[in-house]
Image (cartoon, rainbow, N blue to C red):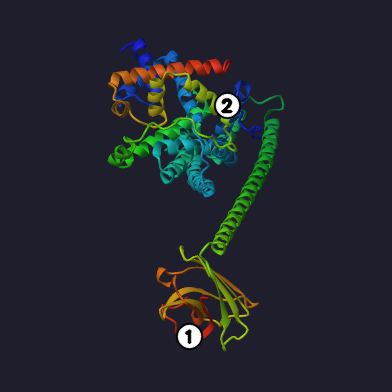
Amino acid sequence: MGHEDYKELLALEAVGALTVEASRSLAAHLETCVECRAELAALRDAAAALAYTIAPVAPHTELRAHVLERVRALKTIDSSDAATDVMDMGDVDAPRSGTSKSDSRLSSSDEYGAWHMLAARPPLMFGTIAAALVIAALTVTSVVLWNRNRELRGDVSALAANADMARQELEKDQQELARAREVEQILTAPDAPVTVLAGTNEAPQARARLVYDKRTGSAVFSAANLPHAPAGKEYQLWYIADGKPLPGGVFNTDASGRAFLRDRVPVAGRNASIFAVTLEPTGGLPAPTGAKFLLGSAS
Amino acid sequence: MLPQLTKATSLTPERKHEDEADIELLHAVARGEEPAFISLYDRYSSILLGLLLRILHSRAESEDVLQDVFLQVWQQARAFDASRGRPFTWLVTLARSRAIDRLRLLDSRHRTATRATEEVPEIVQKGVDDVAISSELGELVRGALDDLPDEQRRTLVLAYLEGLSQSEIAARLGQPLGTVKTRTRAGLLKLQGILREKFKGV
């Protein structure tokens, strides 16, 4: 095949449509043909411009942190690589399985370059003393610069850490907002009656409210004036349908006796007529064993 | 230290300026500078994800490949050669080939089953405004694409943006392979001509 034949292939290569063999054969021609290389570059730019016609889609925010994490993991591998490279200067240009050149390695070879030049230069009029002074001055300068570099690096990673924290806080806020929206949805659902639970003799002052969406089972429960459960114990919510108690979520109250719980009512419990709260071992149980603290019935 | 990044706008001098900024970013990434890498991610992750989704039709797969793409950017930034094309082209080529690798990995039968029945999707979609690449540039290239004869546009889009092979395109459009090749080639050359006209001086 001649130059003209290869030229014909460039457009197909640019859109990635050549067969492997044709592409390989073209690559061999490109090695020697400046014109075809330039033409291919221009055609590739034109093809890639097609990507501008696609609607961009923002990746999930966590993805950015993930990618950074993976990049940092690579960096660590890199710097341990660099340590061995410094000892093995002869190998500086050997291919390195796709990892990027690390900074420490760059600076060490730069330094090597500077020393090398200095050594090659013939002694000036003040002879070796002058050279020694120059070397001393250079050494001081490089130490100062190295420290400065390290400080700046510290600043950069501190900034990155701040940005990470801000991002995490933002994500937390977003999650809270999502939860708040969900609660709002439950409270405003068309078929979500409110049940009031009253304290039993165990806690006469206690009051609670339960709202759940009968279609989805999403529930919100809030309690007040309920004493904080002792160590090893937690409160558990029960949905009692046809006389059978179905286990709900577990919770504890804060120091002021309040609690808020998001729960999902099991399907069988969505037509429950009675709701109760008992004191159970931490983590709750499949069936109630402890004393009832709150009780209410569907209106 | 880093070049001042303006929000990407479309036309000639800005585009050239942006290419230069991107080249500097890639050089900085090659030196292992994380902030430059983050800038590149913020500038291009959305447009690349759009492209990956177009080829892979799955958000999970696309985001997975997107991670691989940026890891590769980090590792291979040194291999970027400005004389071989724009940084944007380098990124798109990288993303596209990773997506096609992934496509080959995924069950090919499943793919032909779901994709062969699909209509050729509409190219013009409503863009998202708050991303780095302005819709103005999209409009411009879309305009150029619209100037192509129908069948050239279709083969070009199927080949480049959908990642179909020439024989898959031939099967999809019911055309002989030779015709598909001719049209792909003619389409790209024409598009190049139109874009060159529009970006005169670049």
Q: Nearer the viewer, residue B133 or A201?
A: A201
Chain letter belonging to callout 1: A
Residue A43 vertical position relative to residue B75 in the rendered view, above or below: above
Secondary element at tag 2: helix
Residue A231 % position (x, y): 54, 81
Q: Nearer the viewer, residue A226 or A155?
A: A226
- Left or right for A193, reference B166: right
Residue A277 % position (x, y): 51, 80
Label 2 neighbourhood size at 10 Å, few (<14), some (14-19), many (20+)? some
Residue A135 vertical position relative to residue A247 in the rendered view, above or below: above
**Which residue position is annotated with label 1?**
A290
Image quarter of the C terminus of chain B: top right
Secondary element at tag 1: loop
Residue B67 vertical position relative to residue B142 in the rendered view, above or below: below
Residue A261 % position (x, y): 55, 70
Tell if the residue under mark 1 belongs to the same chain as the one under mark 2: no
Image quarter of the N terminus of chain B: top right
Kind of residue at disc 2: Asp
Chain letter belonging to callout 2: B
Residue A222 % position (x, y): 58, 72
**Which residue position is annotated with label 2?**
B19
